[in-house]
Amino acid sequence: MEHRTLDELRAGLDHIRESPPDGGVIELIVARPSLDERLVVDEATLDPEHGLVGDCWATRGSSSTDDGRANPLKQVNFMNARAIALIAGEKERWPLAGDQFYVDLDLGGENLPPGTRLALGTAVVEITDPWHKGCEKFVARYGADALRFVRSPEGRELNLRGVHSTVVVAGTVRSGDVVRKLAPVPQSPADARSEATA
């Protein structure tokens, strides 16, 4: 597939900005059983220790930690479904981005600052601070202009490359589930579980 140009990508910004600030839908769930392997699933289990069960997050390690172990602040990743549709085109190419959840939700820092908790299915995750900036693999799969797009001022404002999160309450998530912001932020996993099932 021919990669989209920067002008073509910028032309889609207004549509991305119309993403719902709350109550967005999970469009796709992807597990990564091993490096560069993708498995689209209809249902996933989130766990505070393992992240998305069946995903290689816990075993692949991370260059962002001192000891090379998996970074708990980058346990589960979300990407805006409108952004990946614009960048990748066909839905079959979305999983190449390497994120686990593709959601029709405003992931911008103003709407979802670090510390925001999200209920999805019966699980709860918390948005974390590290910037999801994209890498050489992203360029190889979607083109250099795609990386420029997600790293542009608008791209950073809207977190177009996505956001990181950590699991705070275990649960089951299904494609088509609604993602809800939890406010005020629960003070304990028990509070979060109660609010997620309300």
Image (cartoon, rainbow, N blue to C red):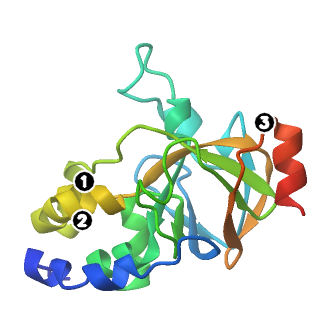
Whichever of labels 3 and 2 marks the residue nearer the N terminus, that label is: 2
Is the N terminus in the top left, top right, bottom left or bottom right quadrant?
bottom left
> How much space separates mark 3 and mark 2, taking CA atoms?
41 Å
Q: Are marks 1 and 3 in contact (CB under 8 Å)?
A: no
Q: Is residue 189 visible?
A: yes
Looking at the image, residue 140 sits to the left or right of residue 66; the answer is left
Looking at the image, residue 48 sits to the left or right of residue 157; the answer is right
The residue type indicated by label 3 comes to Gln
Residue topped by disc 1 = 137
Residue topped by disc 3 = 187
Position of residue 165 measured from the top left corner of the image (x, y, whole percent): 55, 45
Name above or below for residue 51 compared with residue 181: above
Crowd rating for badge 2 (residues with CA inside 10 Å; few <14, some 14–19, many 20+) = some
Position of residue 44 measured from the top left corner of the image (x, y, whole percent): 71, 60
Name above or below for residue 13 compared with residue 157: below
Looking at the image, residue 99 sits to the left or right of residue 142; the answer is right
Query: Residue 144: which quarter of the image?
Result: bottom left
Crowd rating for badge 3 (residues with CA inside 10 Å; few <14, some 14–19, many 20+) = few
Position of residue 138 measured from the top left corner of the image (x, y, whole percent): 25, 58
Whichever of labels 1 and 3 marks the residue nearer the N terminus, that label is: 1
The residue type indicated by label 2 comes to Arg
Mark 3 or 2: in front is 3
Query: Residue 153: which quarter of the image?
Result: bottom left
Residue at the image point whose x is 53% and y is 53% from the top: 32
Name above or below for residue 46 compared with residue 86: above
> How much space separates mark 2 and mark 1, taking CA atoms?
6 Å
Residue topped by disc 2 = 141
Position of residue 114 measured from the top left corner of the image (x, y, whole percent): 50, 43
